Amino acid sequence: MSITQLLFWFLTALALGSALMVIFSKNPVHSILWLITTFFAISGHYILLNAQFLAIVNIIVYAGAIMVLFLFVVMLMNLNASATPLKKKWLRFAGVISGGCLLLVLTAALKDTDIMRQELMMKTGDIGLIHNLGTVLFKEYVLPFEISSVLFLSAMVGAVVIGKKE
Amino acid sequence: MNLLALDGAFVLEKLILIAVVISISLVVAMYATYVERKFAGFIQDRHGPNRAGPFGLLQPLADGLKLFFKEEIIPNNSNKLLFVLGPCLAMLTAMMTSAIIPWGGTVELFGQQVSLQIADINIGILYVFGVVSMGVYGMMIGGWASNNKFSLMAALRGASQAISYELAMGLSLIALLMLTGSLSLKTITEQQVTGLWNIVYQPVGFLIFFVCALAECNRAPFDLPEAESELNMGYHQEYSSMKLGFFLFAEYINMFISCAIIATLFFGGYDIPFVDESTWSGGAAAIGGVLALMTKTFILILVFMWIRWTLPRFRYDQLMNLGWKGLIPLALLNMVATGAVILLTMKQA
């Protein structure tokens, strides 16, 4: 087994294991820490694909910013296992159905991976580097990119407006 | 696809380099505590530590030994695992940034070209940001796991301060990146060796980055997470022995590394000023380069200390106002101005 394969299996086990621990941990703070581990494992996968930019942005945005805010909220509310009431039965049922739908979509997407992998192998391996990514983003996908930035701006304005309301 | 072709010599070379860089960072951090106290003594017109060894030079060793032999206390109502994890994370994130700093050029050892940089990655500066954004976890987890409201408040203060100043830091660097056109610290340094230092092009960017670095390192006047008069002691209130030592030590390592990064980004890195080192032989140029970078770093560390013993601490609302209403708009303005200048000069050419 080559070192790339070893790393792949290690990261896969880490990602799946810590994702399961997010659900099974009793303490919400532990859940968040496991979620951070999951993000790191996924970033590791990106690095294996030589998509360094995606890997580091995943860490900066998700593990660095969003998870800190999660941690803020959980720490300030001082949540623990005894404080959270058990969810209602219909809610749990709805959760199972929506989770199943997600699984269906993911399986359908995974069906095509054989073709996808062949495509990836044909590329030279630097498709994920920042230079190529920037060129694609600002040439082929410039309109969706700009529209999503407007979306972010409106979300920011909305957050400020909500924050201002007493 | 041979992305991860490793051979034994390469692994050995990198391992030795990592060990050397980490030990140098530790020694520098250790003696930074001594220099800080001596410098404070100088500014406040007193002697500073002068008992252990000549000129008190053994003082850091004595402090370290004292911390090691103190009683290890883990509070009963704390979250034991996270309580230990906090200082570990603080130390780890402090060390990780050193991996991408180019400490010097290349030297030839045993017939091999050895670059004095652990990893020259394509996304150098973003890696720094990734590690910096991780840096808050050590403090937050440590503060929360202590199960003490003062620790928790200090940790939240520290984390919100770090998040706020990260933004202005990133924006100030975008202007710099527009000029250099590369995220790799090696390339940025090489550009400065042949051309002018980046501080000439980006004085405002440097100022913003410097202030943000002070805030990120929790140094005075931004040391609100350690405001004794308001928080008893800070996020490390419940810590004792070497776990406390790790938190304090990580702060000094952070200071050393961030000064090295400032020197690399704005002051030419391992470039020796007013000297054309390309005519020197490889080894001499590399050693001179390392010495030049170290000198620049030490001067910046002294400036950090000078600021600490000169300025009083900010109030919390002043800190947030400066970050959000002062530095971020200024950084945005700097970015727009830089972009405009680049556009105009490109048209002329």
Image (cartoon, coloured by chain):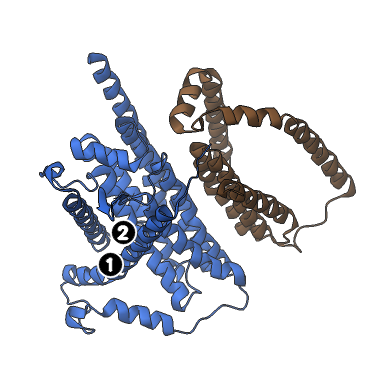
In this figure, which residue is indicated by the disc labeled 1? B32
What amino acid type should be assigned to the residue bearing mark 1?
Ala
Q: Are marks 2 and 1 in contact (CB under 8 Å)?
A: yes
Q: Quadrant of residue B148?
A: bottom right
Q: Residue at x 59, y 31 (%)?
A: A121
Pick the front one: B326 or B190: B190
**Disc 2/disc 1 C-alpha distance (Å):** 8 Å
**Direction from residue B13 to residue B311 in the image, left or right:** left
What amino acid type should be assigned to the residue bearing mark 2?
Phe
User: In the rendering, what colour is chain A?
Assistant: brown
Write down the chain letter for disc 2: B
Identify by letter the chain in blue: B
Q: Residue at x 19, y 36 (%)?
A: B194
Q: Residue furthest top?
A: B348
Label 2 element class: helix
Write down the chain letter for disc 1: B
Whether residue A34 is situated above or below residue A135 in the rendered picture? below
Pick the front one: B286 or A19: B286
Report x, y in % for residue B343: 30, 20
Label 1 element class: helix
